[in-house]
Image (cartoon, grey):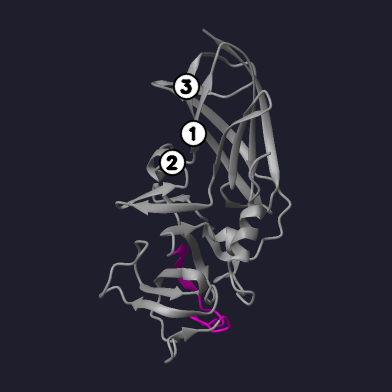
Amino acid sequence: MPLKSGIFQLIMFLCLPPLFALQWPVDRAFLASSFLDDTGGRADPAMVFRNYDSLRPFEQGRVLYHSTPDSWTSLPPGGGDVLILEHENDFQSLYTDLPVLENLGETGVIKGNDSLCPGKEGLRYEVCRFAIRDAREDRLVNPLVLLPAVKDEQAPEFSSCLLVKGDETYKLEENLELQAGEYKVYIKARDYCGKKAFSLPYVYSLYNLGALVLENCLDTVYERAGALYLRNGSSLDSVFSRHSYFCPGEIGFIPGGVRLELALTDNGGNESSQIYNLKVKR
């Protein structure tokens, strides 16, 4: 079975102090794009909220950095005010593209019930980019792993899959005939909450004749020499090289019959799958 997000969530929470109350910084109704969604032609490790009504901290934390556009370039890249809060166990929350913040207090500590952008009738804030960083391991964590779970019983929806070998591209379908060899797998899928596309699937798994042959999890990204990489070492530029498709890796086919199963799992553990019977020639 695919890796379940609940196991990873449990490990993360066991590492946090017992009173570490986490919360969405902006109501999720204002979520415009989620972790590693394609924004502006590139996978973005931040969550983006638009036209929102108020902003609060991810959790109580100490102000590690605050700047205006004139004094610093934001991390991750963006405009507007930049705020970085430091939390327990070397976790940090990053907020960029904000309006001018005036409610940071004098102690340098932001409490969980403090308002960074207060809600006012008829007032809307344009954009907020939000990311969670594990400074101990120098990585950006998928916020959906740590934020309070969304009530969601919908499994991810599969759109299409491409198998690519050199210059040849095949759309995966029943009774497809292929030459033996190594193929890159590109999957187009989304996880929905109600009628709204909420995020990418959390785990992508491929099975051949019931045996797991490929799996990739969108739980975290690492920065190395100015580039971002998944846990397995694949760069974001390589796995998102085709617009709206994710490449979990490569799969090898040998001559004979193939029963290929594609399984998608979201952060809540909901799973969907598709099965294809293929014929592989020499």
Q: Secondary structure at mark 1?
A: strand
Residue to which mark 1 is pinned: 249
Quadrant housing residue 3: top right
Gap between marks 2 and 1, in whole Å?
A: 11 Å
Q: For this rendering, which residue is in front, 216 or 41?
A: 216
Question: What is the distance, in whole Å, between disc 3 and disc 1 at their CAs?
Answer: 10 Å
> Is the residue under label 2 in contact with that under label 3 (CB below 8 Å)?
no
The quarter of the picture where residue 24 lies is bottom right
| Residue 259 point in image, percent of width and height | 66, 21
Q: Is 281 located above or below residue 11 in the figure?
A: above
Which region is colored magenta?
A: 112-134
Which residue is under mark 3?
A: 182
The amino acid on which the numbered mark 3 sits, given as a three-letter code, is Glu
Residue occupying image coordinates x 34% and y 61%? 77
Give left or right: position of 281 versus 67.
right
Q: Which residue is mark 2?
A: 240
Badge 3 element: strand
* Residue 183 position in % (x across, y down): 48, 24
Residue 59 on image: x %, y %: 55, 75
Task: Please give the name of the residue rendered at 59% of the width and 48% of the height, measured from the top-left corner.
Answer: 202
**In the image, is residue 182 part of the stretch drawn in magenta?**
no
In which quadrant will I find the N terminus? Answer: top right
Q: Residues within 10 Å of mark 2 (few under 14, many from 20)?
A: many
Residue type of the residue flagged with mark 2: Phe
